[in-house]
Image: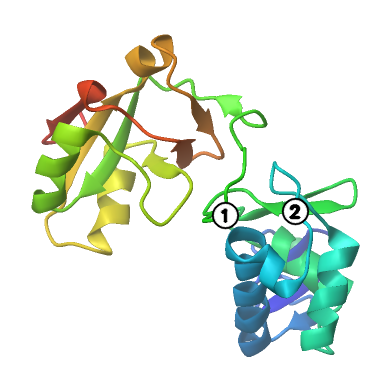
Amino acid sequence: MIRKCKEHGYFRGESCPDCGDEGRYVLDDDREERLGRFVSGALRHFPEDVGIEMDPQGWVEVDQLCDVMKKRYKWGTMERLVSLVESDRKGRYEIDSGYIRARYGHSVDVDLISDYLENDLPDLYYGVSQEEADMLLDNGIFPIRQTYVHLSTSFEKAKEAASIHTDNPVIIEIDASAAQQDGVDIVTVNDYIVLARGIPPEYLSVVESGV
Ligand SMILES: [Zn+2]
């Protein structure tokens, strides 16, 4: 559920995480999920199918997205769209000067490299199954269904992400400093997600722990 605190803005759940106020109702769970699925699909996977225009960096006019949304969901107001974006703890979307885009997770081809900060962590991590690990160490890490590879900023986060798909994941460490020195583009989206078009095998090694 999304509600709005007068003081702290939109939030998910029963009460404002900052002050405990119950705030004002904006969106129930079911609608939040439906709107979330629609926005994710439109901004990450099939903008053309829903009839919106996306620029090369992934931006779409908020008004245009809102029009399309209202045709599907009469209750899909601008406020609800904004509340979905602003209350998102994972920071999936951003709105700027009348435009909106997904910050990561695209399967459509978008150029995010030029818009985000260069990664400044010396090492990054990527968790995979045992079978995948052998293949990646030979061939490098490249995106399969998505446009970018999502790398983790710590050993623990990589393990957590991989555990959704596999038991006992193998954690691969990426020598990000060396890769970047050699011209591999790696950019920071937020505290826990870093994107790259691909990482060649010479920068990869398996690690047993985060220290
Ligand atoms: Zn509050």
Q: Quadrant of residue 118?
A: top right
Q: Quadrant of ligand 1?
A: bottom right
Q: Is residue 114 above or below residue 61?
A: above
User: For the residue marked with disc 2, what is the amino acid?
Assistant: Met
Q: x, y percentage for residue 185?
A: 48, 24
Residue lying farthest to the top in this orientation: 181
Can residue 13 be seen here?
Answer: no
- What residue do we see at 80% from left, 64% from top? 82
- What residue do we see at 52% from left, 54% from top? 105
Q: x, y percentage for residue 200?
A: 29, 27
**Disc 1 residue: CB within 8 Å of ligand 1:** no
Q: Is residue 64 above or below residue 29?
A: above
Side of 48 where 176 appears, left or right: left
How far apart, in angstroms, are the residues tagged by discs 1 and 2? 10 Å
Q: Is residue 140 above or below residue 62?
A: above
- Write down the residue under mark 2: 54
Answer few, some or many: residues within 10 Å of disc 2's Cα (few below 14, many 20 plus, some between 14 and 19).
Answer: some
- What residue do we see at 25% from left, 22% from top? 203
- Specify the label residue 108 is tagged with: 1
For the C terminus, give its image quadrant: top left
